[in-house]
Structure formats: structure tokens, C-alpha cells
Image (cartoon, rainbow, N blue to C red):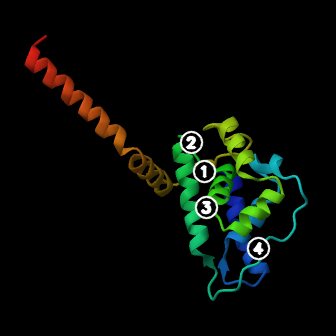
């Protein structure tokens, strides 16, 4: 994760704690993302205001929706072959898979699906203005490599099939 994406995660925790909620919700994540920072800073067209407020929960942790959004953010980054998860990936995942009221709240502020897709296209796999951490931990590095390998198993299968067919053709018809 970029330092800006990590800052958004920390902001999510602060949003939930300030609202005295026991879980960090998609609304908390949206509010943390709406603070102009990193690659998503240019998207915001309306002043930051409170996002839709869900009910409270007993423990301060990510709720199921936020866990799904963060998992989707990793998938968005992997699909772009990015070496990082940035605020743009988190925002794209939230816009695509977040609760409708949160998606509408983000769209009112300029972060609709079209604007986010344009941002992703413009950045490609580049970190943009966001900084990568000085050195990812070995655990983060292994986790990212496993995710990347799991995300593209079809390429390995396709290459293996092509090689097998080529060898078969050469054995049957000769060189």
C-alpha cells in the first residue's frame, strides 16, 4: 500500500472512533477518502461533509463491507499490474462495490464511476503522486506475490497448453 492509502486506512479508524462506532464502515472509509490526498485529490468537487451514518457495533474493526472493498482494491491493483495499492484502487473498489448510499455520496462529490475509471486509465500501474513505503515488510512482499500468482493462473495454463500442442505437432509431423 502507498503511504497515502495507509493514511486513508488510519483515517477510517479515526472516523469510526470519532463517531463512537465499534466497526469501521464503508461510510468511514468514504469520509477518509474524501479528504483530498494522493491520486484521488483532484476528483473532489464538493466540500467534505459527513457521509451517510450507519449504526454502531461492539468492536472497532472493519465491517464485512469494508473488508470486501479492501479485497476488491487489491484485485483492481492486480488487474492493472500495479506494484502497489493506492487511494485510486481503494476508491475504485468502493465506487464499484460499496453500499448504494455511500456510492451516491461519493458521486455527489465528483468521485463517480466514470471519473474513477478515467483516473485509473490515466495512472495505469504508476503510483502517480503517491509514495510507496520505503521498504515493504517481507510478509507484505510474500502476500502480494501470492496474490499476483493466484490472480493470473490462467496464463500459466495457457502457456503450458501451447507448449504441449507445439511439442505434439513437432513429434507427429517432425521438424
How far is mark 3 from mark 2, CA to CA?
20 Å
Residues 62 and 141: in front is 62
In the image, taking residue 133 as reference, residue 166 lies left or right, namely left
Residues under numbered marks 3 and 2 in contact, where contact means CB atoms less than 8 Å apart: no
How far is mark 3 from mark 4, CA to CA?
20 Å
What residue did someone put label 3 on?
Answer: 97
Residue 169 percent coordinates (x, y): 15, 21
What residue did someone put label 1 on?
Answer: 85
What residue did someone put label 4 on?
Answer: 15
- Looking at marks 4 and 1 on the same chain, the residue that comes earlier in the sequence is marked by 4
- Looking at marks 2 and 4 on the same chain, the residue that comes earlier in the sequence is marked by 4
Name which residue lies at 66% across and 75% down.
Answer: 24
- Looking at marks 1 and 3 on the same chain, the residue that comes earlier in the sequence is marked by 1
Judged from the image, the secondary structure of the residue bearing numbered disc 2 is loop
How far is mark 1 from mark 2, CA to CA?
7 Å
Residue 32 appearing in the image: no
Q: Nearer the viewer, mark 3 or mark 2?
A: 3
In the image, taking residue 43 as reference, residue 2 lies left or right, namely left
Q: Residues within 10 Å of mark 2 (few under 14, many from 20)?
A: some
- Looking at marks 3 and 2 on the same chain, the residue that comes earlier in the sequence is marked by 2
What residue did someone put label 2 on?
Answer: 82
Residue 129 percent coordinates (x, y): 74, 42
Residues 88 and 3: in front is 88
Instruction: Give the quarter of the image for residue 15.
Output: bottom right
Amino acid at each position: 500500500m502507498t503511504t497515502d492509502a495507509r493514511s486513508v486506512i488510519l483515517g477510517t479508524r479515526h472516523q469510526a472512533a470519532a463517531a463512537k462506532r465499534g466497526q469501521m464502515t464503508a461510510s468511514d472509509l468514504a469520509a477518509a477518502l474524501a479528504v483530498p490526498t494522493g491520486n484521488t485529490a483532484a476528483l473532489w468537487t464538493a466540500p467534505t461533509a459527513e457521509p451517510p451514518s450507519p449504526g454502531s457495533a461492539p468492536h472497532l474493526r472493519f465491517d464485512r463491507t469494508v473488508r470486501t472493498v479492501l479485497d476488491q482494491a487489491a484485485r483492481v491493483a492486480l488487474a492493472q499490474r500495479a506494484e502497489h495499492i493506492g487511494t485510486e484502487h481503494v476508491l475504485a473498489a468502493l465506487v464499484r462495490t460499496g453500499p448504494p448510499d455511500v456510492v451516491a455520496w461519493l458521486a455527489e462529490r465528483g468521485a463517480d464511476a466514470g471519473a474513477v475509471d478515467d483516473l485509473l486509465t490515466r495512472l495505469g500501474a504508476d503510483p502517480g503522486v503517491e509514495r510507496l513505503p520505503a521498504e515493504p515488510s517481507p510478509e507484505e512482499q510474500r502476500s502480494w506475490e501470492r496474490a499476483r500468482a493466484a490472480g493470473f493462473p490462467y496464463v500459466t495454463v495457457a502457456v503450458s497448453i501451447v507448449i504441449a500442442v507445439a511439442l505434439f505437432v513437432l513429434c507427429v509431423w517432425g521438424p
